[in-house]
Amino acid sequence: MNDDAKFFFFLSGFTGSLVFFCVSLFLYEDVSKSLLLASLGCILFSVAGRRMLCFALSGCDSAKPVKFSNAVDSSEDSTPSIPSGEDLAAVTNLEAVRNSKVIK
């Protein structure tokens, strides 16, 4: 995650914390309950902000389908098939071997 994405993630979390704290303090007039709800708001807004940023950039790794060279598609119009666990393990192992660094 680059610095701009981290900034947006933290900013959305801070905004959620501030909003939930102010609203819950106005509604319940209890500081301890407001702090608890503010922490939940921080988590909710930061996750929502990360999802929005991922959608806006549309380059998030989790949004891209995984393509395998050995996968067989019956037609081009059909939806991509879900890879098996063995395919995922093979691709993961190949990536680990390619990106491994020897520690001396």
Image (spheres, rainbow, N blue to C red):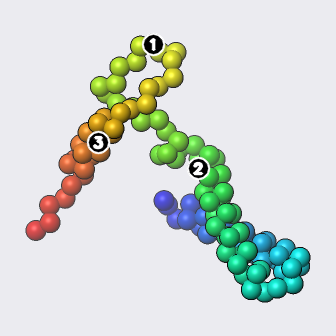
Q: Are marks 3 and 1 in contact (CB under 8 Å)?
A: no
How many marks do you count on the picture? 3
Q: Are marks 2 and 1 in contact (CB under 8 Å)?
A: no
Q: Amino acid at mark 2?
A: Cys
Q: Which residue is mark 3?
A: 89
**Upstream in the sequence, badge 2 or badge 1?**
2
Q: Is residue 87 left or right of residue 8?
A: left
Q: Which residue is mark 2?
A: 54
- Of discs 2 and 1, which sits in the foreground? 1
Residue at the right extreme, as displayed: 27
Helix, strand or loop at disc 2? helix
Helix, strand or loop at disc 1? loop
Q: Residues within 10 Å of mark 1 (few under 14, many from 20)?
A: few
Q: Position of residue 100 (x, y in %)?
A: 21, 55
Q: Is residue 30 left or right of residue 17?
A: right
Q: Residue at x 49, y 61 (%)?
A: 2
**Upstream in the sequence, badge 3 or badge 2?**
2
Q: Nearer the viewer, residue 57 or 65?
A: 65
Q: Residue at x 24, y 45 (%)?
A: 93
Q: Is residue 87 visible?
A: yes
Residue at the top extreme, as displayed: 75
Helix, strand or loop at disc 3? helix
Q: Estimate the spatial distance between the alpha carbons at disc 2 and disc 1, rounded to whole Å.
A: 30 Å
Q: Position of residue 99 (x, y in %)?
A: 24, 52
Q: Which residue is mark 1?
A: 75
Q: Residues within 10 Å of mark 2 (few under 14, many from 20)?
A: some
Q: Amino acid at mark 3?
A: Ala
Residue at the bottom extreme, as displayed: 31
